[in-house]
Image (spheres, rainbow, N blue to C red):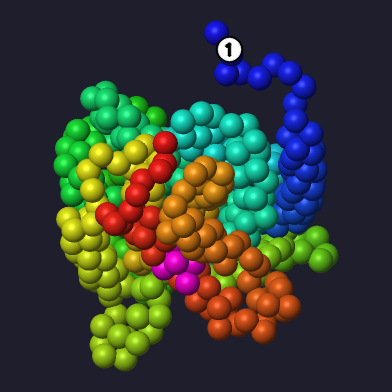
Amino acid sequence: MKSSISVGKPKILEIVFDLLLLLLLLVSIFRFANYLITFSNESLQMDFSAYYTAGESLNHGLSPYKNFVHNQPPIWDGVNRYKYSRFLYPPLVASFFQPLAALPYHVAKWIWGGLELAAVMATFIVAEGFFPAISYRRILLAFSLALWYFPLLAHVERGQIDVFTILLITIAIWLMVKRERFGELSSGILLSFAALLKLYVIFFLPFVFLQKRFRVLYGFGLGLVLILVLTVVFQGSATHLVDYVYNHLPRMANIGDIAKSNTLVNTKPIRSILAQTPPGFDTIKDGHGYLLSSLDFATDATLVEPLWDKLALLGITSRAGISIGLYLIFFAAIAIWSNRYLPGGLSTVEEYLYWQIPVVVTLLVSPVTWTMNMVWLLPLFSVCIYLFSSKQTTSKKISVAIIFIALMISALPDIINAPFLSFAGFMFGQYKYLYSEFLALIGLLLFLGKKRISTVS
């Protein structure tokens, strides 16, 4: 019987492709490593400093939600001048940072940067599980493209946490698609932990209900119980959790007016600390000088922001209310579309694409979506690479091309960093991430639409 596995000399085109892929990977790593070294050495990485300082506070038996710059020794994130900290997450997240906070800040920054890149690679590896066969070429090509993705650069410069959120979401979707009882429960648990990192992951739940994946919902509830138990285990009590729910979560929910519930601390200790800042830097932490920012970028990637600007003139100032209203509109529209155009019996790849819809909708309607949050779209690189390399109808190829164009729009640097794009400011200006999200959503809906001849294996 003839073997279907070739054991002869690889074709010359395969060798050329592998060499080009290796070259792209090396160039991508070299370029990104240069940025990573710069950020780790020079930038405060403001978001990571908030996480680290919250862990530092817990290590001293203090609340992660207050500014302890007056403490001896001072516990300060290098930025905050208010009585409340910049840490906006449930207290269990702060516990995750306690081991890093036990290390010098400049060392913890390097470890965090390595963990971020590891999470990106792990996401692409998990994404391969949705395809008929795992391909190291797809993984390396997707990872190489990701290293040129501007929101990932901004993510690392700020030291954000979203690459771990999308990793949890991707694993949760993989378990959901497997449709095994324990897998669906585990999927729900992972979604609850993803919501621990980004609360707006709860926008997934109505989509889960729409697909009647009730074991996933049970798993989500079980995950919330597990989060409560772990909080008590790691922190000895639920004191910080109760404080978070009753005092800080309402304050944080009032996005845009958060400073109104905050007050400035006595800045004398801060001035004393900043007086030790080395020349050429903006702030100091753990004896090292840092710039507050090493990369400029557009901040908003949510539809709530431009609508809030207009509706505020009418007296509507609640971003959370606008967010929920937008979500209900999108969800209702997609529910109607699902009922009319989404067939049953989706392939694994198609089902994975379906669960990218709530990913994109969440980015579109969250009260706050930053440039860094756009890393949630990274798994679409793997999907596009697979679909481009597999047999598809012309309409399907057009749909995939739309998704890929969406990725390219968000991948390009913001105009402030790339003046050569100013000629296309209408596309790459203030709302480029919104264009990207809308195009990605359109591409997904077109690909999954009922009037299609499925050729995905």
**Which quadrant of the view contains residue 364?**
bottom left
Q: Residues within 10 Å of mark 1 (few under 14, many from 20)?
A: few
Q: Secondary structure at mark 1?
A: loop
Q: Position of residue 155 (x, y in %)?
A: 58, 55
The residue at the far front in this view is 1
Nearer to me, 282 or 166 = 166
Residue type (three-letter) at the residue carrying disc 1: Lys
User: Is there any visible trace of residue 422 in the rendered image?
Assistant: yes
Residue at the (27%, 54%) spot, across then down: 450
Q: What residue would you read off at disc 1?
A: 2
Q: Position of residue 130 (x, y in %)?
A: 43, 35
Residue at the (19%, 33%) spot, across then down: 215
Name above or below for residue 399 compared with residue 95: below
Residue at the (67%, 84%) spot, across then down: 423
Residue at the (79%, 34%) spot, across then down: 12
User: Is there any visible trace of residue 154 in the rendered image?
Assistant: no
The residue at the far top in this view is 1
Q: Position of residue 58 (x, y in %)?
A: 46, 40
Name above or below for residue 141 compared with residue 405: above
Q: Which residues are magenta?
A: 435-440
